[in-house]
Amino acid sequence: MSTRNRISTSSASSKIEHPELALNESYDEAIIPLLTTIDKIRNRIADIDTTIDLPAIVVIGEQSSGKSSVLEALSGISLPRGGQHMTTKCPLELRMRRASTWHASLECSGRIIRDNIPTAHDIGQHINTEQNRLTNNRDQISKQVLLVNVEASWLPNLTLIDLPGIIQVTSRQQDSGSVDIIQELIQDYLDRPSTIILAIIQACNDIETSAAIKYAK
């Protein structure tokens, strides 16, 4: 499936007082049906071995590179913060949809883990709890995908897949096998032709030595 679909905005008129709002509405009208279709296909193939390749924006970066901060800025949603521990322990698929009322849920392997999460600030706690369950409360990596569905009036219509941070140096608490699992996860997504890479690096780091940029190349 190609990610180069063109979006027509020919309905915009020079008489419109706020053309940027008209553009957003035109974008939503074109994109929402596509995202809905992709979501349905993802749900159907989540638990089967398949070669179907769906478009996805995949977020990669080194540990402590600021991935969570960028995602929080994009979504307004609270995500786990690790301190000295791993923050993202498994692939996190964040499905954001614009809607008039708030609704949020957390799924894993097609099963709803938490439904009707009350606020955006509560989401990170539920993600963290489920990650710890999948990894037995250790600094390890799970290949299980956590799906966060969020609807709110301020959200863009966007789906992002956040992968565990690239480990440059393992700590005493971290399993050395996690390095290999993270590399496998990243490479698996990058090998898919329709993947769009969002590489996160710290502003103070040299772009030429960034592991995320090396993967993106």
Image (cartoon, helix red, strand yellow):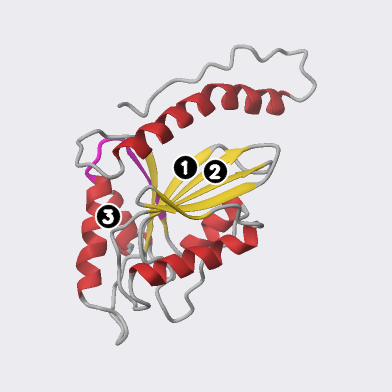
Give the Cα distance between marks 1 and 2: 6 Å
> Dot 3: what SS?
helix
Q: In this rendering, is residue 95 above or below 62?
A: above
Name of the residue lying farthest toward the bottom = 172
Other-residue count near label 2 (Cα within 10 Å), few / some / many at <14 / 14–19 / ≥20: many
> Pointers 1 and 2 in contact (CB under 8 A)?
yes
Side (left or right) of 192 relative to 136: left
Residue at the location (47% across, 30% down)? 36
Q: Which residue is mark 2?
A: 96
The tag earlier along the polypeptide, 3 or 2, is: 2
Three-letter code for the amino acid on which mark 2 is drawn: Met
Q: Which label belongs to residue 159?
A: 1
Place of residue 116 in the rendered image (x, y in percent of width and height, measured from the top left):
60, 52
Q: Which image quadrant: the N terminus?
A: top left
Name the residue nearer the viewer: 216 or 146: 146
Side (left or right) of 30 relative to 141: right
Give the Cα distance between marks 3 and 2: 22 Å
Residue 19 seen in render:
yes
Magenta span includes 151: no
Residue at the location (34% across, 77% down)? 139
Three-letter code for the amino acid on which mark 1 is drawn: Thr
Q: Quadrant of residue 174?
A: bottom left
